[in-house]
Image (cartoon, rainbow, N blue to C red):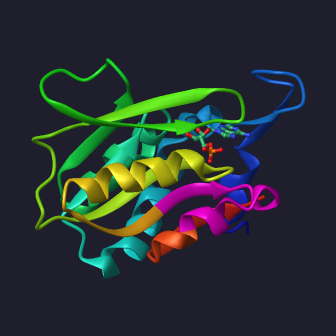
Amino acid sequence: MQTLQERVRELIIDIPNFPIEGIIFKDILPLFRHSDLVKELVSEMANELRVHNPTALVAMESRGFLLGMPLALELNIPFVCIRKKGKLPGEVNGISYTLEYGQAEIEIQKSALSPTDRVILHDDVLATGGTANAAAQLIQDTGAQLVAFSFLMELNFLNGREIIGLNNVAIHTFAQF
Ligand code: AMP
């Protein structure tokens, strides 16, 4: 009998040289064709996150939304989106950060969090950690407390854990590659 971990890993598919030469893209969409498995996964991930007594779950555009929303539902807390610059209506706070090639900018709605919030930040993949680190800064700038990072998977060889570890909050990764 396979474990949940084994069943999930089997449905994360390596796509070599996508979106550019040299990158092995982790395709998580096959996982979402198995609703019972996703329900089990969300329940297991939420159980680990509950210990932090979170009051909001913030997810990263765009694949972070896929598990972020059901995790927020399971935890019974508000769901908040961080999106790429220019996508969110109303007043926003933004932060720009350096990617391997060039700059990126992400934003959050000013009305989304308050200083009393205890926030979980969720994304699908922890790679170099640059994106999650910028998002952590954006959350902390609202005055809210970041209490944990949550990722479906971590790419160990890129050492993203070292960068985001500087935030001194818990890091949960369901699968490691
Ligand atoms: P990073 O800032 O390097 O940690 O990259 C994290 C972001 O890039 C996440 O939002 C991921 O969705 C995406 N990402 C990075 N590497 C991969 C990969 N090998 N496969 C799929 N998504 C990736």
Measuring 71% from the left and 43% from the top, which residue is drawn there?
Answer: 12
Compared with 29, 73 (above or below) is: below
In front of the other: 71 or 84: 84
Compared with 112, 158 (above or below) is: below
Quadrant in the rendering for residue 28: top right
Measuring 37% from the left and 45% from the top, which residue is drawn there?
Answer: 59
Measuring 47% from the left and 61% from the top, which residue is drawn there?
Answer: 150
Left or right? Give the position of 142 relative to 85: left
Measuring 24% from the left and 76% from the top, which residue is drawn there?
Answer: 53
Left or right? Give the position of 89 relative to 149: left
Q: Which residues are magenta?
A: 150-164
Quadrant in the rendering for residue 87: top left
In front of the other: 14 or 10: 14
Q: Position of residue 164 (x, y in %)?
A: 55, 64
Q: Position of residue 2 (x, y in %)?
A: 73, 66
Q: Position of residue 147 (x, y in %)?
A: 34, 72
What is the total number of numbered labels drawn onto the structure image?
Answer: 0
Compared with 67, 46 (above or below) is: below
Q: Position of residue 105 (x, y in %)?
A: 44, 30
In front of the other: 167 or 53: 167
